Image (cartoon, rainbow, N blue to C red):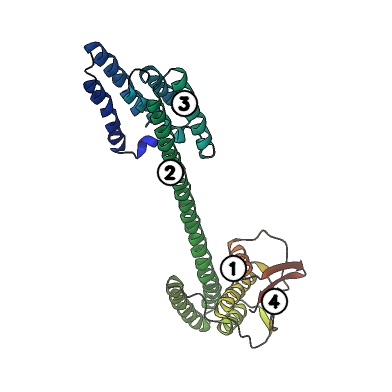
Amino acid sequence: MKKGSGWGWIPFVWLVYLVGIPLELAGRHATPQQWTFELLGVTVFLPIYFAGYRFEGKPLVWIIAALAALGAIYAPGLAAATVYFIYAAGFIGFAVPSSLGYRWLAGYVALVAAYCYVAHVPVPTLISAVVFSALIGAVCVRQAEMLVATCELRRAREEVERMAQVAERERIARDLHDVLGHTLSLIVIKSELASKLAERGDERAVVEIRDVEKIARESLAELREALAGYRAAGIAAEVARARSTLESAGIAVDYAGDDVRLPAAQETVLSLALREGVTNVVRHARASTCRLRLAQSPELCRLEIADDGTGGGEREGLGLLGMRERVEALGGRVLREYGAGTQLTIELPTA
């Protein structure tokens, strides 16, 4: 955080401590030469002081040195001029890493004390310079630590928000793929079938077109439900949908399954996995038969989708990646095996 970005009127408030210089001069009935000398110091101080609020890190060390030099020049002749030492101490916390702030401050205070002693600065003035430099410096070091912590917290919050947005976009992409990918594939298959039947003058083309209309309406309803937070109709409904999809594509279905009872989260993930697996069989496998197996034990639910198609180790697409993410998020796993076709196995813990 650049210090000049958020101080507002605070730098002007701290200038109140300069009032001690003219007050002491007036109380001492200083000569015009003394007034000129001391006010020259104030004139030099002001631009250096305000520059300190525009820098941080190493450049600020020079600001501290310049302010301390003013203190060294003016403090021996004017007690109020020890305020320059205090202003310098206030910038230490912003000049070095927070872990070094107190060490630097301790060293600085020791140097101020040593200089005032060597320069024969009166003891009350020496004590004032040391005590207030230590107190104000410690407060500013702590303030610098809090500013750093605040900046880190802000950056962490921004990163969390960014990651949440990315995760939400990925979730929406997975949901849209799961909802639309399956039904659009089915619409394509039925439309092709209807076209072929219509070319032969077969009246079944009308039936297929009506099925396309029905599927499109169901797809629209599913999309609305997904956008409202609904994810799947349940595993039994998804099995029936999968069998219908495969049979419409001319793929024989060999199904055997238990009466599965799962928590809502597991059932939703398993249903979407079944939908994605069947969609991939229809789209890519060029299979004639698809075997579906659904089994549940006290600890595990297992879904197998196997086809006798071309097989192969193609790179996983968005659908399979989304399936794997959802399954693994619930402690399960996804296995793909190739041979005379492809077998997809999804295992989910039932708890």
Residue assigned mark 2: 147
**Quarter occupied by residue 78:** top left
Which badge, 1 or 4, is on the more N-terminal residue?
Answer: 4
Q: Residue 85 versus residue 140: which sits nearer the camera? A: 85
Inter-mark Cα distance, 1 to 4: 17 Å
- Location of the C terminus by quadrant is bottom right
Neighbourhood count class around disc 1 (C-alpha, 10 Å): few under 14, some 14–19, many 20 upward = many
- Three-letter amino acid code at disc 4? Glu
Q: Position of residue 179 (x, y in %)?
A: 51, 71
At label 3, counting other C-alpha atoms closer than 10 Å, the crowd grade (few under 14, some 14-19, many 20 or more) is some
Residue 144 in the figure: left or right of residue 338: left
Q: Residue at x 29, y 31 (%)?
A: 17
Sequence-earlier tag: 3 or 2: 3
Q: To which residue does mark 4 refer?
A: 304
- Indicate the quadrant containing the N terminus: top left, top right, bottom left or bottom right: top left
Q: Which residue is mark 1?
A: 326
What residue appears at the point 46 percent right and 53 percent down from the top-left corner?
A: 157
Residue 195's place in the image compared with 151, above or below, is below
Q: Is residue 208 visible?
A: yes
Residue at point 50%, 36% (across, down): 101
Percent from the top left, x then y, of residue 206? Answer: 48, 82
Q: To which residue does mark 3 refer?
A: 113
Query: Dot 4 lies on which element?
Result: strand
Q: Amino acid at mark 1?
A: Arg
First along the sequence among labels 2 and 1: 2
- Is residue 142 rendered to the left or right of residue 32? right
